[in-house]
């Protein structure tokens, strides 16, 4: 789920929409309900949970996949400090871990009393633990429990060839005037899919298993009699990078040619744009696409001054002018209202490598009024640490 800042919340309050039995064939060939576990349904998500632990209509604490919970907390010890992954249990694709609110409040209370709390965060803890505290669906408790997002790009598994962002390469935080590239997962948009999006015409493009890159150019041409002022840069998901790090940083090395093209275009057209895409190739996630060299495939363009995201058609025209490549096209279609159908259709081979299951797809309305990502369950179940 995306929080109010447009960033992914890993631990938050969700509503139990339904509790369903999980059945299996017993030794007699008869269908039988599992004795100790049931399926909890929240929005478009399914979780396998302990029977009689949650009730329909109540709030619970949902920990999404890719979340890493503190391993020194007894409640989380069964996870051993590893990230939460998609699993298939008794035929049910389970995505995430569920806890009751009192369980997590105990964790938060312990953190509040044992670790230093920044002054600006003190009120959040105090209000949450107060005697008249109120809780709402969607409340983001990620920082309060000490959860972090698994980041494979900075893990040690990649070895010397891994695409990493070294701390010294960071020029500063990600620019506040550009939205980050996080797309909401379709499972968090069950109501919107059913009542708002169904039947709308959309463009589907492949979601590549790469590393997020943002390239921008700001042109200040308020005074026609003066030379234009420029601000430009290349960013990873969370940081703007020093451009002089091209020899050691593959984000910058691969992004500089695109930046030069974007600068020329923005100066000529007196516009300020950000291009966002996926860095793929050698050193990125084991290079599943078997590409011979690093490249960036772009999936969106953003007009910084107008605060406007380009439609797919506008993006294609821009990329053609800049001679840059988009993420692979999947289809132009009418969006189904069936959540299971939308998710199942994400299962397919990648356009970049037919031997590799694609990670999923990004669905965008033709007028760019909404967009979301659909991660393939088939891909998730095969994914390795």
Image: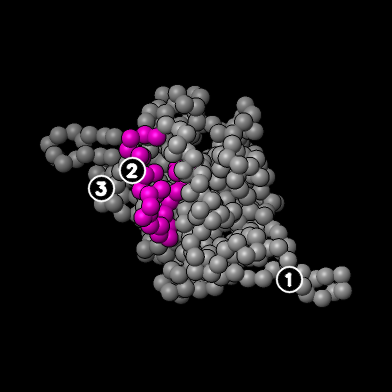
Quadrant location of the C terminus in the rendered image: top right
* Badge 2 or badge 3: first in the primary sequence: 2
In the image, which disc is placed on residue 123?
Answer: 2
Mark 1 and 3 residues: CB-CB less than 8 Å, in contact?
no
Q: Which residue in the structure is indicated by mark 3?
A: 305
Tell me the mark number nearer the camera, choosing from 1 and 3. Answer: 1
Q: Secondary structure at mark 1?
A: strand
Coordinates of residue 305 in the picture (x, y in percent)? 25, 47
Q: Which residue in the structure is indicated by mark 1?
A: 33
Q: CA distance from mark 2 to mark 1?
A: 46 Å
Residue at image point 44% right, 39% down: 112
Considering depth in this image, is 173 or 82 the residue closer to the camera?
82
Residue at image point 38% right, 28% down: 171
Residue at image point 38% right, 57% down: 134
Tell me the mark number nearer the camera, choosing from 2 and 3. Answer: 2
**Left/right of residue 169 with respect to residue 342 in the rendered view:** left
Q: CA distance from mark 1 to mark 3?
A: 58 Å
User: Badge 1, how many Cα within 10 Å: few under 14, some, many 20+?
Assistant: some
Q: Secondary structure at mark 3?
A: loop
User: Badge 2, how many Cα within 10 Å: few under 14, some, many 20+?
Assistant: few
Residue at image point 82% right, 76% down: 30
Count every numbered label the image shows and give the total.
3
Considering depth in this image, is 168 or 56 the residue closer to the camera?
56
Q: Which contiguous range is marked in magenta?
A: 117-145
Coordinates of residue 1 in the picture (x, y in percent)? 47, 55
């Amino acid at each position: 789920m995306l929080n109010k800042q447009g960033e992914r919340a890993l631990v938050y309050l969700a509503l139990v929409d339904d509790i369903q039995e999980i059945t299996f064939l017993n030794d007699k060939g008869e269908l039988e309900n599992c004795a100790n576990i049931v399926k909890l349904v929240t929005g478009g998500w399914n979780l396998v949970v302990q029977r009689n632990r949650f009730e329909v209509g109540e709030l619970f604490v949902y920990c999404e996949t890719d979340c890493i919970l503190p391993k020194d907390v007894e409640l989380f010890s069964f996870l051993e400090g590893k990230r939460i992954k998609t699993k298939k249990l008794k035929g049910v694709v389970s995505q995430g871990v569920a806890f009751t609110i009192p369980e997590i409040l105990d964790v938060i209370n312990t953190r509040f009393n044992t670790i230093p709390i920044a002054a600006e965060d003190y009120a959040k803890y105090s209000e949450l633990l107060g005697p008249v505290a109120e809780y709402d669906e969607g409340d983001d408790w990620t920082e309060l429990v000490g959860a972090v997002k698994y980041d494979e790009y900075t893990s040690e598994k990649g070895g010397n060839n891994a695409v990493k962002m070294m701390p010294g390469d960071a020029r500063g935080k990600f620019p506040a005037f550009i939205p980050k590239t996080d797309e909401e997962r379709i499972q968090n948009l069950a109501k919107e899919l059913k009542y708002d999006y169904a039947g709308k015409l959309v463009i589907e493009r492949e979601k590549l298993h790469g590393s997020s890159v943002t390239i921008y150019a700001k042109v200040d041409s308020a005074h026609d009699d003066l030379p234009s002022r420029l601000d430009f840069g290349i960013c990873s998901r969370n940081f703007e990078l020093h451009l002089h790090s091209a020899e050691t940083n593959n984000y910058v090395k691969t992004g500089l040619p695109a930046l030069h093209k974007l600068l020329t275009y923005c100066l000529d057209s007196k516009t300020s744009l950000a291009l966002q895409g996926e860095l793929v190739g050698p050193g990125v996630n084991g290079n599943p696409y078997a590409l011979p060299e690093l490249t960036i495939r772009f999936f969106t363009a953003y007009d910084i001054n107008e605060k406007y995201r380009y439609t797919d058609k506008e993006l294609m025209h821009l990329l053609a002018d800049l001679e840059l490549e988009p993420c692979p096209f999947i289809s132009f279609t009418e969006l189904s209202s069936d959540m299971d159908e939308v998710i199942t259709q994400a299962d397919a081979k990648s356009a970049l490598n037919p031997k590799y299951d694609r990670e999923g797809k990004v669905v965008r309305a033709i007028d760019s009024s909404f967009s979301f990502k659909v991660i393939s369950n088939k891909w998730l179940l095969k994914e390795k640490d």
